[in-house]
Amino acid sequence: MDGANGPHGTVDLVADQTSVLPGTPFWVGLHFRLEAGWHIYWTNPGDSGEPPRIKWSLPAAFQAGPLNWPIPQRIEDHTLIDYGYQKEVMLPAQITPPARLDAGVDTQIGSTVNWLVCRDICVPGRASLTLKLPIRNG
């Protein structure tokens, strides 16, 4: 797990398993934990804001699927209605490794994440996160 402090919260890159099996998809997620009263946005943010964006840096022949978005909360602010997440949220994506990999070495999943965290004002956040996982056979 790799994490970073951002404005008004933290973001971690986590995996659902402790190693990579050749050709077997696994899940990696952005885990946001936000300070009380702050929020980030859903893929369709509503009247204002923008959702988190991720740029993957993957080993050769690895492929990343899209982020999966949990059902958002409705966030009302005066006359604006937005959709997003408060407190914490996990945004997972499926990673598919190639069928042929050398066992016994580590592979690195990297990402650059940009997000907007808001309350009365909005503050941009950015983090470069990496996750090392060993490759094993069977």
Image (spheres, rainbow, N blue to C red):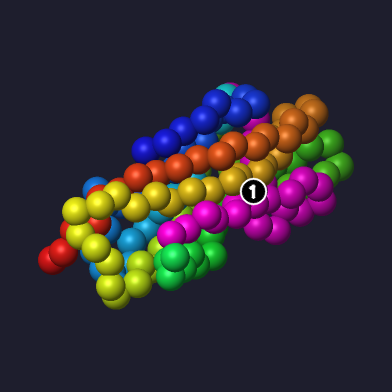
Q: Where does residue 138 sit, x and y in percent of width and height?
A: 13, 66
The residue shown at (78%, 27%) is: 120
The residue shown at (46%, 37%) is: 12
The residue shown at (28%, 73%) is: 100
Q: Where does residue 101 sit, x and y in percent of width and height?
A: 27, 66
Residue 112 showing in the rendered view: yes
Identify the image quadrant of residue 80. top right
Residue at the left extreme, as displayed: 138
Q: Quadrant of the N terminus?
A: top left
Residue at the right extreme, as displayed: 79
Q: Amino acid at mark 1?
A: Pro
Residue at the bottom extreme, as displayed: 99
Q: Where does residue 127 sit, x and y in percent of width and height?
A: 59, 37
Q: Is residue 12 magenta?
A: no
Identify the image quadrant of residue 103. bottom left
Question: Which range of residues does the magenta coloring cover?
Answer: 36-59
Q: Is residue 49 magenta?
A: yes
Q: Is residue 127 above or below residue 95?
A: above
Label 1 secondary element: loop
**In front of the other: 55 or 103:** 103
Q: How many marks?
A: 1
- Label 1, on which residue? 52
Relative to residue 28, is residue 126 drawn left or right? right
Q: Residues within 10 Å of mark 1 (few under 14, many from 20)?
A: many
Relative to residue 94, is residue 35 drawn left or right? right
The residue shown at (43%, 70%) is: 61
